[in-house]
Amino acid sequence: MQMESPIKRRKTRQIMVGDVAVGGDAPISVQSMTNTDTCDVAATVGQIKRLEDACADIVRVSVPTMEAAEAFKQIRAQVNVPLVADIHFDYKIALKVAEYGVDCLRINPGNIGREDRVRAVIDSARDKNIPIRIGVNAGSLEKELQRKYGEPTPDALVESAMRHIDILDSLDFQDFKLSVKASDVFMAVAAYRKISQQIDQPLHLGITEAGGLRGGTVKSSVGLGMLLMDGIGDTIRISLAADPVEEVKVGYEILKSLKLRSKGINFIACPSCSRQNFDVVKTMNELESRVEDITTPLDVAVIGCIVNGPGEAKEADIGLTGGTPKHLIYVDGEKDHKVEKEHLVDHLETMIRDKVAAKQQAEQDVIAKQS
């Protein structure tokens, strides 16, 4: 029972990161970044595959040395998800990973050095249809901008971004996306709002160095939520001091909450109170862990009592309302049957998987008829 988002997204130029469209009318993509030693090919490939399983659309890999570039070649051959190479300063590394099949270069043209080096990278990117991500960060602003503004500010971030953009403009290269990140929510939001009025390239959203799993999730949700509500943002990365897979999960939850993306189960669950007729928290913890592998969109309501339960259950694909002595199950908004407490989680999991299978079969039937 999914509904469309009321958010009107900003119109942007579309670029391709591998086979993932970013910008235009493409879905907002979810990214993460490996935190393994890139030269440890097995560990990096293993982490990327876990991110693929979590449905990451794009994965960024740090490539700080030529040795890492050679490792990147092996990594690229073993994974399917589009890869962005994170490179700073050394243009030769950018040329090497471009040769090895990178899908996007995260490199700031103003930091590469001489004009001939910048041109070499841009020419290679153009020849191989590789987009560039300009990544401006409040923690690494140019020294002259630090002196000019005294401290990182939204205007400083935007001025830094425009310097890099001017270089790409001078070389007639428009296939780029941009980020203007800060760890301060207000600064990042102001910078993104300002730059969104000056360029039509897609924007990569993020609150950089947001913190640990809980604090970083909250900070990212607030900052990115404000921007996404404004229609700003084409791809997102949640920066957490945590397992990168958690970044992908949080990213999708943010997009699901704004109805901008639907992946997996959207749970509507009460926080529980003394009215509850079963242990809602325990039920939710177990159920969430069991159906984490499901990517098909589905609304599931788990409510502990009859006060709010029926109303929420009627709006869900599958709904549970706590009762005495049995609990009432709704299917597609209608009362369907009752279940005992002892079989609650097993029963809900079976219903969810059956419902998902039915939806997938219906989608396949439609495709078959069209072909």
Image (cartoon, rainbow, N blue to C red):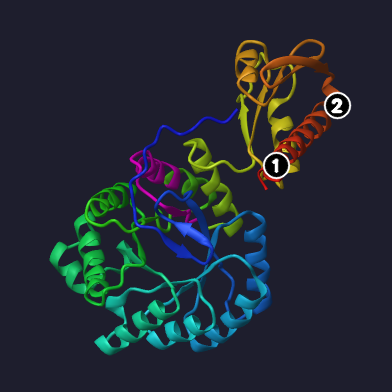
Q: Nearer the viewer, mark 2 or mark 1?
A: 1
In the foreground, 336 or 190: 336
- Residue appearing at x 36%, y 57% in the figure: 202
Disc 2 and disc 1: Cα gap in Å? 39 Å
| Residue 208 appears in the figure | yes
- The amino acid sitting under disc 2 is His
Q: How many marks?
A: 2
Work out whether mark 2 precedes mark 1 in sequence or the reverse, and give the earlier one: 2
Region rendered in magenta:
220-240
Q: Where is residue 307 in the image (x, y as percent from the top left)?
A: 62, 10
Instruction: Please report contact status of discs 2 and 1: CB closer than 8 Å, yes or no.
Output: no
| Disc 2 element | helix
In the foreground, 139 or 174: 174
| Disc 1 element | helix
Which residue bears the numbered disc 1?
369
Write down the quadrant of residue 41 in the picture. Answer: bottom right
Which residue bears the numbered disc 2?
343
Depicted 180 relative to depicted 79: above or below: above
* Quadrant holding the N terminus: top right
